[in-house]
Amino acid sequence: MNFKRLLAVCAASLTTAFTAQAAVVTASSTTPTAICDRCVVTSTLNVDTRGTLSDVNVSIVDLRHTYDADLAIWLIAPTGTTVQLFNRRGGSADNFFNTVFDDAATTAVANGAAPFTGTFRAEELLSAFNGQDAFGTWTLRVADLAGADVGVINNWNVQLTTVPEPGSLALAGLALVGLGMARRRKAA
C-alpha cells in the first residue's frame, strides 16, 4: 500500500470515528413472572448488541402488587453489577405502571407515591453500569419482604445508550499519526 493510499484510509477512519453517534438499544421482557409472598423472583432479558454503556434507564411498564412497600427491586447487569431501584416505598398503595428509573429524573423514587407512574431517580445511581458492555443477560430482581400480598411482573425493559467502540478511536489515532507523517514529509 503506498503512502497516499494509507493516508486516505487513515483520513476515512478519522472521519468515521468522529461522526460515530451514540446508539440506543431497548430490550424488553413481556413474560409474566409471579411475585410470590415473602420470596425473591427474577425476570431476565437478553441484549445481543455490543457497545460501551454511557447511560442506562429502566422502565417497569406493568408490575402489579398490592402494598408496594413490601417490595425491593434491583437491576443486575450481565457483569453482575447490581443497582437498587426501589426499596419499600409507597406504603399500602399498589402497582407500578410506566415507571421509569433515570439518573436525570428530577424526583427521587423516595419522594414518589404509589401507584408509581412517571420518571424517578432510583435508590442508587444507574451510572454504576457506565463503561460496561451492554451485551448479555440483564436481570430484574424483585423481593417481597412481607407477608399477605402477592403480584406479577408483566412487562419491563432497559434502554441502553452506548458510545462508539474503542476500536474506532484507535483508528482515529492511526489517522492522526498518518496525517502527522504526511506533514513531516511535505516539510522535508
Image (cartoon, grey):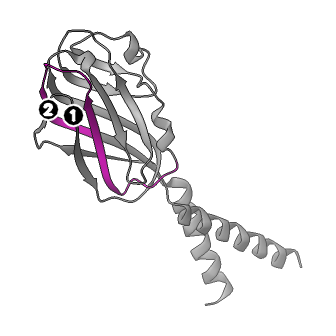
Magenta part of the chain: 131-157
In the image, farthest residue toward the bottom: 1
As helix, strand or loop, the secondary structure at mark 1 comes to loop
**Amino acid type, label 1:** Cys
Image quadrant where residue 183 sits: bottom right
Residue 90 falls inside the magenta stretch = no
- Furthest toward the right, the residue is 188
Q: Are marks 1 and 2 in contact (CB under 8 Å)?
A: yes
Rendered residue at 17%/15% (across/down): 94
Residue at point 31% right, 31% down?
73
Q: In this view, does 8 lie above or below 3?
A: above
Q: Nearer the viewer, residue 84 or 149?
A: 149
Amino acid on which disc 2 is placed: Cys
Tell me residue 17's x, y (percent): 54, 60
Q: Percent from the top left, x then y, of residue 137?
A: 30, 54
Residue occupying the point 32% across, 15% down: 89
User: Which mark is drawn over residue 39?
Assistant: 1
Q: Left or right: 175 with respect to 161?
A: right
Q: Indicate yes or no whether the magenta region holds residue 155.
A: yes
Location of the N terminus (image quadrant): bottom right
The local crowd at label 1, few if under 14, some if 14 to 19, many if 20 or more residues have their Cα within 10 Å, is few
Residue 160: image tag: none
Front position in the image: 41 or 63: 41
- Quickly name the residue at label 2: 36
